[in-house]
Image (cartoon, coloured by chain):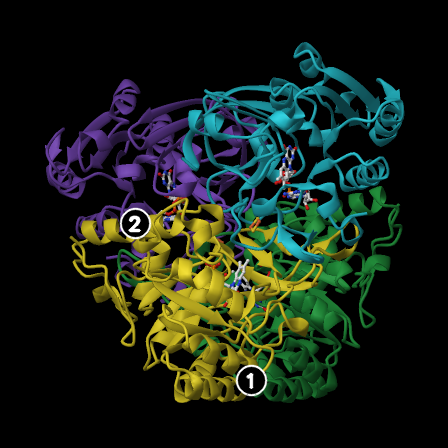
Chain colours: A green, B purple, C yellow, D cyan
């Protein structure tokens, strides 16, 4: 028996595989495919205070080994979430994390304060890095200053642990991670999607109604893995790694590079049971390699 | 069983860019309803990355049939599969057309344009089984674009074909053909699948003549299971309109719930 | 007959397809495969003043739809280049551009001053963006300040037009482009490779001896295209676009997004004749779409 | 012609993970020399992106043969090709082994380890044709790893096999077998291809016994044509050492030019 438990300090997970926000609906969409209790946890779709329309379609374009999305964080808002959705997904034997969004600092705080009054949420994942909502990908995670300010405010307000989800669209992701950490982040998750674009040559128009979107999937894995390594090798808080994880091997590479847990995103679209398959592959690899506790391999990358 | 990784291609038929695949998959065959679709992985690995949505063209205890037109890389790869090849399929998915005892003895028009004919064979069969009197309308650009006409005829359906260039059947748009037939005698129900302009025109014809109508919508789909919010159309609900996931709440919607102005051409 | 000419202002090219630096050797490597005169031009491998060893192998890792390289700018230096290589490639009916490197500002200037004395170079492409030579991808193109300073110095020294090649590893590529432009750049080329990493799970070591490398190829196209559009839609100087161009359609998308010319990189490895195939595909597309002058489609992307 | 996009798979043979492909390609067959390699595209499209280097296993006026072991995705895809499938091949590339009239009547050892046997069939044939007396050494982990032994025997070569587990031939490393034979009678020339440790050990044996030796090196290759500087090994030249592109200056190098200490284990 492999000990799969993952330890984020502020949160113990039964295993290091979570489903990533925006790629796992509100969780229940996947119940026909597997028992949610198998997962370490899942992060529900980004939530604003009120309901949100999202962007006009087309919202998706497939690229070589990747997917550009410009959903625009369509969602039901905290009220409907806590009334209709949360009761169905809490207490199911897996950690529920909420991906928190806001148009400004106040909205982030309002979301957290509202949700704090409701049971069944293990932690917040602060989405300061969605490239699809403001013009040309602007978001708080592009600057250490806005990151620190926002994280500080949310931490002050929140009763729960706060994981800060970073953007890869930056020159120095370590600097942003440090700002988040210094402002009190309990953990860091990265990466969100890469600001990208696709052009329809025949119409000479962007393929996405929103013009820009966020690239995810195996295409971005090598950049995501680099960033996770850069941050994890310096951070004081635990790191959750993601970006293009499709297999157990991918996931293990992120763990070796320093992530304490991983999130599976786009892979959930390709295979509804991808996250549990990845978990099984991790377990098999550990078995075959005499690793009895998965967490022992976290950060074991040897350099030089 | 919602993921069938052991589906197997039994046989293929091809007409130009069109393909009919007969697939062994008891789990899919037994559970599929008309208007539902499957998500099929064209090739292992990352290119193309996503599954492709295809309507269930027919279903039975042994498996399903798919009918499609080669539109790009994914469908081209599927078109190259050979009998015996394994297929990786998620489904059946979505909410299909209404097939109920209430249509017993009623006249139902099933209207398909181009590859949009795909779900209508299964539908017509089930409607007929429920006692409805079905007329199938099948439109294409040329005679080469209505390859399934023999199949519908052999199955004994009343079939009216149209081609834009007049190379077979009615010369003109299938919507005009449907309009003519509605003029001759209003059906009790109408079901359609095809290009947006066709469905939009049909929707207004149906509204004018007060024929209840259902339409199967298309969209680029990320997941097919309601997880990505990629496949939205503008759908009316409770007085308002919202971007609604067609993979979950559709792909079939009553005509009066679809906000046509917000969508397509 | 389609008019293929591309106009960079300071440089007229017979067509908009160039081969990218580091992916086309010194040019002669491709002579067995096609007549170099078919190309708009080619950019020779990055050149320091002296010869350079490059990094230890392994230097390459393939990823999903991409290639990570950490060659480390191995090269012969200006002396050997001008004596042994330049005489073989100049005057061949295609523009020769030299990709200029330096460990510091002075070396960039020295390279340019040395080469200024030699005939047969159409322009310099200032490589301020190679991620494989300094620690964790550091390079001048990561900051507007270092970009401006270096470009200013090189422009003062150079008799030839200077194209500045930007890095995609930045938060705001437009800001860097503007700094280059303000400092006198005649043109802007982008993108260089994306800082990336790959891990060998079995050995738990990086797959590249250099740990980090630069990701190129179709995987990065959507991000590269976005950056080219962002810069080209605002720049006063012409833009050369690249990143994952494998086909004529890809190239045309970059032109539509605003690039006046494109460079073909990784594709040259896959097909030695990729650049001429891409050119042919551009020509065919123009023919089929009634475009009589390729340059008429530059920047024709319609937004909104 | 240096790119053959019309090469065609004629036949395949397989032994476990090993494959022999007979390929129709007169342009490659007529120009290839022993020790040269080709770059072959395993699949259209972006995964895998790069071509894969494979040595020319044999060549003749109609085409070439390749022999390889499935090592990963690219070779797995190649292993799945069927006769008649088109192949896209760049080659022949690189500089091969020395085959010259000067070896007439001389004793040459050709030493292959595992898949490293690939270039040695063509080499042995050409050496024999030039009048050399060839002994082929063929080492593998088990009897299953020396599938070409019958082929060499049938072609009339003197063949000495070794297996690490003793399941066929000499029990032990092929280097030890070569050492034993050198002890019995020094050859005039030695050619080898195999894993780095094997070649390193052979190089020192050859140096000790002053046998001129040539080695075919391996490396991950980006282009195979000298354009990427990805495939370098540490090679001595003019008193110094430098990272040298093995696709252009090799893959075959004289043992005394290879800086073994800088490379491999
Ligand atoms: C619920 C549903 C059921 C469908 N059933 C059928 C069917 O039974 N038979 C059939 O022939 N086709 C059907 N389609 C359309 C089919 O899914 C697309 O033709 C297919 O996904 C194209 O994939 P590709 O890789 O071949 O083309 P791509 O290279 O991906 O795209 C080619 C062109 O098709 C467009 N496209 C891509 N995906 C879709 C999509 N999901 N819907 C509409 N356009 C798309 C692209 O924008 C592009 O213009 C259905 C679509 C949906 C949403
Ligand atoms: C000049 C030359 C000639 C060769 N001739 C033969 C031959 O005739 N028969 C044969 O079986 N093999 C030969 N090889 C090795 C062969 O190229 C690799 O096994 C193949 O490229 C692996 O590709 P893949 O996609 O199957 O595996 P991948 O998934 O790409 O890699 C599998 C493993 O092989 C390693 N690898 C990848 N490429 C190479 C490479 N070029 N050289 C060495 N290791 C590599 C990877 O690092 C990895 O550990 C030759 C290599 C070179 C450089
Ligand atoms: C369709 C889609 C929607 C997403 N929505 C969100 C979101 O609401 N909040 C968020 O933080 N990240 C969102 N993401 C980003 C993912 O959570 C993840 O960070 C990213 O996709 C990289 O992982 P992957 O390559 O495994 O998909 C979304 C990604 C996709 C593809
Ligand atoms: C092996 C390799 C070597 C490269 N060397 C250089 C170089 O010397 N100078 C430079 O400016 N860019 C260099 N590049 C970057 C390319 O010129 C190009 O910017 C990048 O690869 C993106 O284009 P592509 O995706 O078409 O390859 C190199 C790229 C590769 C793959
Ligand atoms: S396709 Fe993903 S939600 Fe409908
Ligand atoms: S493989 Fe590219 S230089 Fe040798």
Q: Chain of mark 1?
A: C
Residue matched to label 2: C281
Please give the name of the residue rendered at 57% of the width and 35% of the height, measured from the top-left corner. Answer: D36
Circle 1 packing at 10 Å, graded few (<14), some (14-19), many (20+), is: few
Instruction: Classify mark 2: helix, strand or loop.
Output: helix
Name the quarter where the C terminus of chain C is drawn. Answer: bottom left
Q: In this view of the protein, can residue C45 be seen by the observer?
A: no
- Residue D40 in the figure: left or right of residue C262: right
Q: Chain of mark 2?
A: C
Query: Residue A264: image x %, image y %?
Result: 64, 57
* Residue B116, quarter of the rendered image: top left
* Residue C125, quarter of the rendered image: bottom left
Of B135 and B55, nearer the camera is: B55
Query: Residue B75: image x %, image y %?
Result: 40, 38
Please give the name of the residue rendered at 62% of the width and 65% of the height, measured from the top-left corner. Answer: C72
Q: Name the mark nearer the viewer: 1 or 2.
A: 1
- Residue A141 in the figure: left or right of residue B174: right
Query: Residue D147: image x %, image y %?
Result: 72, 20
Name above or below for residue B131 compared with residue A224.
above
- Residue D57 in the figure: left or right of residue B131: right
Query: Residue C199: image x %, image y %?
Result: 71, 56
CA separation in Å, label 1 and label 2: 42 Å
Of D138 and A90, nearer the camera is: D138
Residue matched to label 1: C106
Circle 2 packing at 10 Å, graded few (<14), some (14-19), many (20+), is: some
Of marks 1 and 2, which one's residue comes earlier in the chain? 1
Name above or below for residue A254 compared with residue A125.
above
């Amino acid at each position: 028996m492999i000990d799969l438990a993952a330890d984020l300090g502020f949160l113990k997970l039964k295993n290091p595989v979570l489903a990533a926000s925006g790629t796992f609906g509100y969780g229940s969409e996947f119940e026909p495919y597997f028992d949610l209790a198998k997962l370490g946890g899942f992060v529900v779709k980004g939530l604003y205070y009120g309901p949100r329309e999202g962007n006009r379609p087309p919202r998706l374009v497939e690229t070589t080994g990747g997917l550009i999305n410009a959903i625009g964080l369509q969602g039901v808002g905290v009220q409907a979430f806590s009334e209709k959705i949360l009761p169905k997904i809490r207490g199911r034997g897996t950690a529920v994390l909420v991906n928190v969004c806001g148009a400004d600092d106040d909205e982030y705080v309002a979301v957290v304060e509202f949700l704090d009054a409701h049971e069944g949420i293990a932690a917040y994942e602060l989405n300061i890095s969605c490239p699809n909502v403001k013009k040309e990908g602007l978001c708080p995670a592009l600057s250490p200053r806005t990151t620190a300010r926002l994280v500080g405010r949310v931490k002050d307000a929140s009763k729960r642990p706060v994981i800060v989800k970073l953007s890869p669209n930056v020159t120095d992701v370590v600097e942003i991670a440090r700002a988040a950490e210094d402002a009190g982040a309990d953990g860091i998750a990265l990466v969100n999607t890469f600001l990208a674009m696709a052009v329809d040559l025949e119409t000479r128009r962007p393929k996405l109604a929103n013009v820009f979107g966020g690239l995810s999937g195996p295409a971005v894995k090598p950049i995501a893995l680099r960033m996770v390594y850069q941050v994890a090798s310096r951070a004081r808080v635990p790191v959750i790694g993601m970006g293009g994880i499709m297999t157990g091997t991918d996931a293990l590479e992120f763990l070796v590079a320093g992530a304490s847990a991983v999130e599976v995103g786009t892979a959930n679209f390709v295979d509804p049971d991808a996250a549990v398959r990845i978990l099984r592959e991790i377990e098999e690899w550990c078995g075959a390699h005499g690793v009895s506790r998965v967490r022992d391999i976290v950060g074991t990358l040897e350099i030089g | 069983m919602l993921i069938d990784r052991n589906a197997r291609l039994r046989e293929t038929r091809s007409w130009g860019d069109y393909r009919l695949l007969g697939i062994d998959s008891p789990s899919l065959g037994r559970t599929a309803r008309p208007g539902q679709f499957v998500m099929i992985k064209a090739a292992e690995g990352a290119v193309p990355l996503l599954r492709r949505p295809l309507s269930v063209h027919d279903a039975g205890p042994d498996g399903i049939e798919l009918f499609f037109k080669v539109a790009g890389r994914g469908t081209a790869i599927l078109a190259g599969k050979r009998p015996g090849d394994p297929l990786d399929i998620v489904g059946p998915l979505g909410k299909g057309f209404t097939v109920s005892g209430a249509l017993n003895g009623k006249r139902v028009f099933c209207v398909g344009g181009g590859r949009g004919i795909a779900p209508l064979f299964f539908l017509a069969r089930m409607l007929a089984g429920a006692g409805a009197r079905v007329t199938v309308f099948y439109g294409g650009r040329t005679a080469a674009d209505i390859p399934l006409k023999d199949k519908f005829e052999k199955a004994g359906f009343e079939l009216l074909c149209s081609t834009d260039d007049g190379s077979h059947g009615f010369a003109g748009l299938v919507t005009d053909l449907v309009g003519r037939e509605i003029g001759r005698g209003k059906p009790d129900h109408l079901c359609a699948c095809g290009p947006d302009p066709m469905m939009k025109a049909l929707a207004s014809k149906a509204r004018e003549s007060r024929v209840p109508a259902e339409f199967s919508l298309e969209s680029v789909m990320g997941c097919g299971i309601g997880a990505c919010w990629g496949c939205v159309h503008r759908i009316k609900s409770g007085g308002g309109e919202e971007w609604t996931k067609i993979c979950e709440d559709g792909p079939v919607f009553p005509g009066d719930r679809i906000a046509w102005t917000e969508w397509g051409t």
